[in-house]
Amino acid sequence: MKKATALLCILCSLFCVSACNRAKQAAQEAKDLVLPDREPLVKLMDQYLDAVVRHDPAGLPLAEDVKLVENITPTPVGEGLWKTATSGPTEFKIYTSDPTGGQVGFMGVIGDGGKPALLGARLKVVDGKITEIDHMVSPIDGEVPEGLLKPREGLVTKLAVGEHASREEMLKAANAYYDAIEFSDGDIAPFADDCMRRENGVTSAGNTAPPPPDEGETPFGAMAAFGRLKCGEQLSTGIMGYITKINQRRLFAVDEEMGLVMAYSVFNHDGEPNPLPIKNMPGVTESPNSWGKFTVPAAHIYKIKDGKIHEIEAMAIVNVNGKPIPYQASDGWNNTRQDLVNLMDGYLAALAKHDPSAVPLAADAKIVENGEAIKTDAGLWKTATSGPTKFKIVTADPNRGEVGFMGVIGENGKPTLAAVRLKVADDRRVDMGGKIVEVDHLVVHGDQPLNPNMAAPRPAFLARDLKLERVHRDKMAEIADSYYEAILKDDGTVAPFADDCQRRENGGITAGNPKPDPKSDFAVFEKMKCGEQLSTNVMSYITDINDRRIFAIDEELGLVMAFSVFRHDGEPKVMTIKNVPGVTERKNDYGPFELPAAHVFKIRNGQMHEIEAIGYIYTDKDGKWITGFKNGW
């Protein structure tokens, strides 16, 4: 008995020590966690909403050039909701305040024209002035849903000590939600088991309410049983597979004290595949996708606790002034893919007219042509004489605000190969202050007749990838970069080349050529597949490929465009060839030289199918091959 009592005392003592240590650790964490005061921005949002309802901006700290976008439409302050709002927020109101980033978000129910509406609002504050405003206004038809009467506790409760994640982790978790939808994989995002998603007040995932006895189909065409699945497992069924692309993501407010992230985005639906293949759902193998093409701008608030997503509150708009949202529309702030294509078209036209005033060049825009910085009175701005021929490939990346062109233009009255890169400041639309801040010109300056293959691009470079053929943009960049690594390592298995891969360089087919010139000493290599050719060591004369800039990832077309410099030191003098019957070596008589190049890679199903490249050998003013090329950046 005494032994048992002694043992019990020891266990109690250990427990008390452990509990004490945990208490000390929690106290230290609380002491170490110093967060900026979120309340001033919350009060500013309240002040703003009050002014909107009063239809009077007097007293608000508005910047002189403040910009407002309401339901994806640039709108002057004083118009739109400023005229129609009739009452302030109800009990349903959620604030996401980010003093560090200088932004604050709001989602709540207000009165608009005397009727309830769901409002998503954003204010950006710089030096105490409101410089940007967003209004997303979604009318509520009929009775206000129960989910919009008051916010869930998790969305209005501060995190406890030890539940915080870093800003970076919070942003990564929130952004992963969109990737999980795009790729129908709930494991991509860190969903908590108790995660619940609501959309315009309706629970669409993690619904624990008992189903009504007469439950039929949801407005989305899928059985409501999907709504009772956990957030992650629901996405892994593929039921959200009709959502093709979620772009123009703006994760603008990170509320570290509350554990909230608020974001705007645009959901694009291409109408395929139809039907949707469904998995992991007993008795269901497919679901119809008959809505066709449409676009939905949305706002989301994520509750992130212990690094996991617990609550998702979402709202969306489906029309503007009674009209459907245009397919692949801009959110009013950002460039779409088509905006960037139009910008490149305008730039090339301005080059041919020698009129830089026709394009939105920033006053300090940097222009680099063939490695040398130039002004708008030199280079192609002086020598270009006509715009693109039919050979034109445009790789547009709205995420990065960059767009690339590869094709044939006129220079001094003759056709030449060229590649152009444009970068837009802050990825912003021209009508919202966006300017071209960086420009690259790579010009071959060829005096020789163009290869007949430069008459028109291969159709694959103009065709959009189906959703099921796409991979994540990070993976696309990795695949493109692996091409250079495969060359340097003389190993075609390093890169995922498709069996039908064909590489063209300045129009000539240098790999995957079904009809090589039998007189060429390179014919045996030309007819090889892209990967097997590199594994022969025939490219071993290439010493390095550096200054790599993978700058445009066109997810819709499955294209990646990149600039690089191929360096050659002239060694080895004789290359050892392998895996080619009857060929054991090949001379390397080129000597040292460098070749600035541009590449466009076509990627489908995670493999490279087409490669289009142009480049020129770096020379001095007398045309002698030299080394020491610098890309100008």
Image: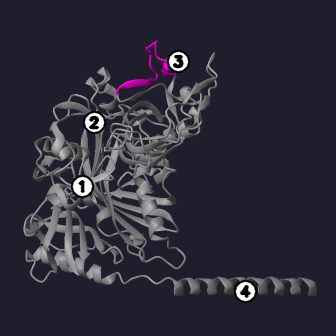
Name the N-terminal-most of marks 3 and 2.
2
Is 508 rendered above or below residue 325? above
Q: Which residue is mark 2?
A: 445
Q: Is residue 272 visible?
A: yes
Q: Which residue is mark 4?
A: 16
Quarter placement of the N terminus: bottom right
Q: Which residue is mark 1?
A: 334
Q: Does dot 1 land on a helix, a strand or a loop?
A: loop
Q: Amino acid at mark 2?
A: His
Foreground pick, 487 / 303? 487
Q: Which residue is mark 3?
A: 524
Q: Amino acid at mark 4?
A: Cys
The answer to whether mark 3 and mark 2 are in CB contact below 8 A is no
Residue 517 in the magenta stretch? The answer is: yes
**Magenta part, dominant SS:** loop
Q: Amino acid at mark 3?
A: Val
Name the N-terminal-most of marks 4 and 2.
4
Q: Does dot 2 land on a helix, a strand or a loop?
A: loop
Q: Residue at x 14, y 73 (%)?
A: 87
Q: Residues within 10 Å of mark 2 (few under 14, many from 20)?
A: some
Name the N-terminal-most of marks 4 and 3.
4
Is 68 rendered above or below residue 18? above
